[in-house]
Image (spheres, grey):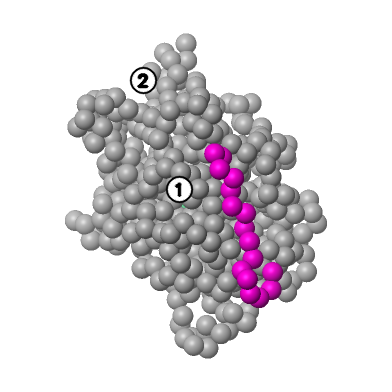
């Protein structure tokens, strides 16, 4: 019955009752133990600093080896409030535009998010736990602005304040997104700012310093340390963030079951690894168990090709070396990354979980040139066929999925590709304007 129902339809929806009730933790199923975070040989303990600033439940989840972690009832309600479960779409129109005969394309709709990205999935959980633990303010940094917006939103829904340190070069031009955060009640500072000693040091050297994610993380940590009732939140890379994001893959798995189809390849863009991990990890768990066959491809920018060109070793998460050392694929925490429109993909390291899976050959990666021509061309084709304007970051996933689809077609292989659309592009029109006008 289901098959007939969905045969000619593009949208595969779950009912509210089908919202997953547990997150999936891949850690106990990894073929090799995950190398734990550690302190550098010199200086104060970063682990102790982080422990003091993080939400306690998030810290517990960071270290958890339980395979399934219940989603609190209140967080399930918040997910529903934010529009979950989100649909999976069959990209029938894009398939037609590409003249595909053997390859089926699907996409998961994380763009249907109140703030524009998948980041609300972890922001809502973190804010809920923080409120439960009596915290009053959530502190964070943001690069592209998506994480800052998601945390501002989640803080407000749980009755908390939020303070966002936003990389100045982006803060300056994304005026609408800045206003969106402020409208949600957040306090937003351009970073480097005069609010912290790290920020003041950079400003003294250059009053117009463009900032970086690393500097903003350092500022957020310092600010949180100095303020009672503050909790520091992170939007990617860490285990607990990927854990919360598995809601994406768990829903997607149920949706494929409904239509009796299954993906041979899952593609997502990757900056720090949270949307990639979110959609891929539940499937990877079943691959590791021998229950299914599927491949996994991370789409990156050559501006920050951490999985493609990085080294697998311990490195800091920020430029000022305030975070613990994480074992990950890294370009080096002091590396300069050229600016691109898909700012969310500009991070020097990939999540330890995804890094280990890459090291083991289970995850593959590809990087696209910094002129972003190919990816914006893919985003335009997606808009003109499917009708949805996606985030610049997500266009990397679409580009990679299209390239793989055309390759399978040429080789006469029947394949199913599922891509994750990590966000919408309705606040990224200026980026489209610049890149697309540059194209035509
Ligand atoms: C933040 C962001 C990304 C990159 O972060 P990951 O942790 O790698 O997922 C990708 N897409 C969008 C829309 C984002 O906001």
Residue 433 visible somewhere in the drawing: no
Q: Quadrant of the C terminus?
A: bottom left
Q: Residue at x 43, y 28 (%)?
A: 293
Q: Which residues are magenta?
A: 30-45
Confirm if mark 2 falls within 8 A of ligand 1: no
Residue 20 visible somewhere in the drawing: yes
* x and y, in percent, of residue 111 in the image: 47, 44
Residue 44 inside the magenta-drawn segment: yes
Q: Is residue 321 left or right of residue 65?
A: left
Residue 195 inside the magenta-drawn segment: no
The answer for how far apart the CA atoms under marks 1 and 2 are is 40 Å
Q: Nearer the viewer, mark 1 or mark 2?
A: 1
Q: Is residue 292 left or right of residue 323?
A: left
Disc 1 target residue: 359
Quarter of the figure with residue 434 = bottom left
Magenta span: predominant SS is loop
Identity of the residue furthest to the top in this view? 1
Q: Does 419 sit above or below residue 300?
A: above
Element class at badge 1: helix
Q: Residue at x 32, y 44 (%)?
A: 400
* x and y, in percent, of residue 267 in the image: 40, 40
Is 323 in front, or is 417? 323
Which mark sits nearer the N-terminus, 1 or 2?
A: 2
Q: Residue at x 32, y 27 (%)?
A: 415
Identity of the residue furthest to the right in this view? 134
Q: Which mark is residue 8?
A: 2
Q: Residue at x 26, y 32 (%)?
A: 408
* x and y, in percent, of residue 362 in the image: 44, 40
């Amino acid at each position: 019955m289901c098959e007939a129902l969905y045969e000619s339809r593009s949208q595969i929806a779950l009912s509210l009752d089908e919202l997953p009730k547990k997150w999936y933790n891949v850690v106990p199923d990894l073929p090799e133990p995950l190398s734990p975070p550690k302190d550098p040989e010199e200086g104060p303990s970063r682990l102790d600093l982080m422990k003091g600033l993080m939400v306690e439940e998030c810290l517990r989840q960071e270290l958890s080896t339980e395979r399934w972690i219940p989603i609190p009832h209140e967080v399930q309600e918040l997910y529903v409030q934010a529009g979950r479960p989100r649909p999976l779409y069959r990209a029938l129109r894009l398939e037609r535009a590409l003249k595909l005969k053997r390859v089926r394309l699907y996409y998961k709709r994380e763009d249907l998010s109140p703030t524009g990205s998948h980041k609300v999935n972890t922001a809502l959980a973190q804010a809920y736990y923080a409120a439960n633990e009596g915290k009053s303010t959530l502190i964070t940094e943001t690069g592209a602005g998506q994480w800052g917006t998601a945390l501002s939103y989640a803080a407000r829904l749980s009755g908390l304040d939020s303070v966002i340190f936003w990389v100045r070069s982006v803060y300056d031009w994304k005026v609408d997104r800045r206003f969106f955060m402020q409208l949600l009640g957040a306090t937003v500072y351009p970073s480097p700012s005069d609010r912290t000693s790290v920020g003041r040091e950079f400003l003294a050297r250059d009053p117009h310093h463009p900032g970086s994610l690393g500097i903003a993380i350092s500022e957020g940590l310092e600010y949180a340390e100095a303020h009672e009732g503050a909790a520091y939140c992170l939007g990617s890379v860490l285990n607990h963030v990927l854990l919360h994001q598995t809601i994406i893959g768990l829903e997607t798995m149920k949706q494929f079951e409904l239509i009796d189809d299954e993906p041979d390849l899952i593609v997502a863009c990757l900056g720090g690894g949270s949307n990639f991990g979110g959609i891929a990890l539940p499937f990877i768990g079943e691959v590791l168990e021998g229950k299914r066959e599927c491949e996994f491809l991370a789409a990156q920018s050559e501006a920050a090709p951490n999985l493609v060109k990085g080294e697998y070793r311990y490195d800091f998460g920020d430029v000022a070396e305030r975070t613990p050392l994480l074992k990950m694929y890294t370009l080096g925490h002091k590396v300069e990354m050229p600016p691109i429109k898909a700012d969310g993909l500009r991070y020097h390291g990939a999540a330890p979980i995804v890094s280990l899976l890459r090291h083991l050959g289970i995850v593959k990666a590809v990087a696209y040139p910094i002129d972003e021509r190919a990816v914006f061309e893919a985003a335009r084709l997606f808009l003109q066929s499917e009708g949805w304007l996606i985030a610049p970051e997500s266009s990397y996933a679409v580009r990679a999925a299209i390239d793989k689809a055309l390759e399978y077609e040429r080789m006469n292989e029947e394949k199913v590709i599922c891509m994750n659309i990590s966000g919408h592009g309705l606040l990224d029109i200026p980026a489209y304007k610049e890149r697309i006008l540059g194209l035509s």
